Amino acid sequence: MCMRRCLVGLTFCTCYLAFYLTNKYVLSVLKFTYPTLFQGWQTLIGGLLLHVSWKLGWAEINSSLRSDVLTWLPASVLFVGIIYAGSRALSRLAIPVFLTLHNVAEVIICGHQKCFRKEKTSPAKTCSAFFLLAAAGCLPFNDSQFDPDGYFWALIHLSCVGAYRILQKSQKSNALSDIDQQYLNYIFSVVFLTFASHPTASCSVDLERPCWFSQKGKAPKGDRRKRSLTGCQLENSPQAAERLALPREKTARRTHLLS
């Protein structure tokens, strides 16, 4: 039993880190900074996987009442804020910095339980929240790659995380299970991000920017080092400019001869 729990915990930690590493690679290395489109893909895949698991009998999703769905709607809005602001923050901050700021949401939850709900918190939990807050407060002064925009989006992200968990705990008596809540979050996120991608011009980014698809160019035979050029680099290269300039020169010559 203990070995099984350890394997489950190890699997969760591995998938958790792989998720952030993959997102960081796409957002920072590949420079795909279009959160509405990127998060729309992720929520669509997550919703499809959860729907297939439901149809195969691996997960149980109840057909909830309309009143329960409407009650959970504010939490779904906060979920969109979590993934959108988190994507913007992760594209600008290092993973350790982002995760440290992400964990500050526990301070918001602890403060809400102690100040508003008058619940007793253990000294260990209070000390943990204090150390998390102190670590987050020291980050901007010791971050060599300080980015104000990244910290701004991280602040929005952790605020949405704290509000989401507070709302989730306050609706424990709701008929929706955790899987039902996540399923509704996916559906709402896909619909909202699809409509939000039009004003942000994210839907047409793949058609307008072919540089997202890497194209490797062959190096000359005498050059042993092969160079890798993306689509945008090929368009902005001097060779491409010369090719575009030749037809223009021919057209200008013909016009001059005719005149």
Image: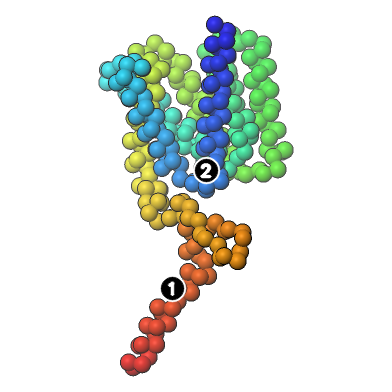
**Is 165 left, or right, of 54 in this rendering?**
right
Task: Name the residue located 47 percent from the left edge and 24 percent from the top edge.
Answer: 164
Q: Position of residue 88 (x, y in %)?
A: 52, 41
Q: Where is residue 106 in the image (x, y as percent from the top left)?
A: 58, 22
Q: Mark 1 points at which residue?
A: 244
**Is 106 left, or right, of 71 in this rendering?**
right
- Looking at this view, is 238 or 156 the one in front? 238
Choose the circle earlier in sequence order: 2 or 1: 2
User: In which quadrant of the rendered view does residue 147 lie?
Assistant: top right
Nearer the observer, disc 2 or disc 1?
A: 1
**Above or below, 188 relative to 202:** above
Q: Position of residue 22 (x, y in %)?
A: 53, 36
Q: Can residue 227 be seen in this view?
A: yes
In the structure shown, which secondary structural element does the residue marked by tag 2 occupy? helix
Task: Name the residue located 46 percent from the left edge and 51 percent from the top edge.
Answer: 212
Q: Distance between the residues labelled 2 and 1?
A: 32 Å
Task: Name the residue located 52 percent from the left edge and 60 percent from the top edge.
Answer: 218
Quarter occupied by the N terminus: top right
Q: Position of residue 115 (x, y in %)?
A: 57, 16
The crowd level at tag 1 (other Cα within 10 Å; few <14, some 14-19, many 20+) is few
Quarter occupied by the C terminus: bottom left
Q: Name the residue under label 2.
A: 27
The crowd level at tag 2 (other Cα within 10 Å; few <14, some 14-19, many 20+) is many
Task: Name the residue located 40 percent from the left edge and 56 percent from the top edge.
Answer: 208
**Is 210 left, or right, of 127 in this rendering?**
left
